[in-house]
Image (cartoon, rainbow, N blue to C red):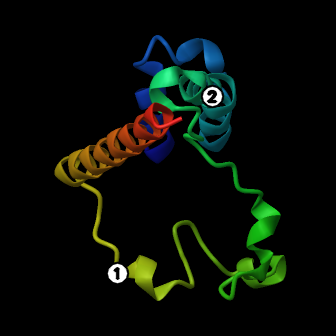
Amino acid sequence: AGRTRELRKYLNRPDLRPHFDERDMICKVKQDVWRWLQAPELQRRAAAREFGALNLSATVDFDSFRSHPLWMRGEQRASLGVKSTNCELLRSTPGRTRWSTQQWMAAGDAALAAAATVALAGLAFR
């Protein structure tokens, strides 16, 4: 039921359909949509003058987390199940709701607009 529900979000968006194979696992669907649509779109937007060539995304290599104090080696992760974690903070994180998602998106949009304003102000002083 979880995969079906998540995949439906992608299937219901005609603009996303050409970028993934619905027979793939949902994690691969997400990776493909990121790789073939979303990442190039962010790069295109970052190049636009209105964003002052700001980097709008960051790709983090999985292995770069190895130095983090909560990193668990493969054999340690073998006992973990779906959605389990060794992070106490994450366990206390409230569930996501439509309202909280809207609040989060509004905060992100405001931060992006503020960064763009700063970048444009910097261009004005050159």
Q: Nearer the viewer, residue 34 or 73?
A: 34
Which residue lies at the image location 60% right of the left edge and 72% below the top edge? 81
Check the image and name the residue furthest to the front: 126
**Mark 2, other Cα within 10 Å: few <14 / some 14–19 / many ≥20:** some
Q: Which disc, if any, is residue 8?
A: none
The numbered mark, 1 or 2, whose residue comes first in the sequence reads 2
**14 displayed left or right of 35:** left
In the image, is residue 102 above or below residue 64? above
Q: Nearer the viewer, residue 40 or 75?
A: 40
Q: Is the Cβ of the residue at disc 1 closer than 8 Å to that at disc 2?
A: no
> Label 1 amino acid?
Ser
> Residue at label 2?
43
The quarter of the picture where the C terminus appears is top right
The picture places residue 102, in percent across and down from the top left corner, at: 22, 45
The picture places residue 104, in percent across and down from the top left corner, at: 29, 52
**22 displayed left or right of 107:** right
Local secondary structure at mark 1: loop
Indicate which label's residue lies in the foreground, 1 or 2: 2
Which residue lies at the image location 23% right of the left edge and 53% below the top edge? 97
Check the image and name the residue furthest to the left: 99
In the image, is residue 117 above or below residue 11? below
The part of the image, by quadrant, that contains residue 31 is top right
> Label 2 amino acid?
Gln
> Residue at label 1?
92
Local secondary structure at mark 2: helix
Which residue lies at the image location 49% right of the left edge and 33% below the top edge? 123
**Mark 1, other Cα within 10 Å: few <14 / some 14–19 / many ≥20:** few
**97 displayed left or right of 67:** left
In the image, is residue 112 above or below residue 43? below
Which residue lies at the image location 63% right of the left edge and 28% below the top edge? 43
The picture places residue 108, in percent across and down from the top left corner, at: 34, 47
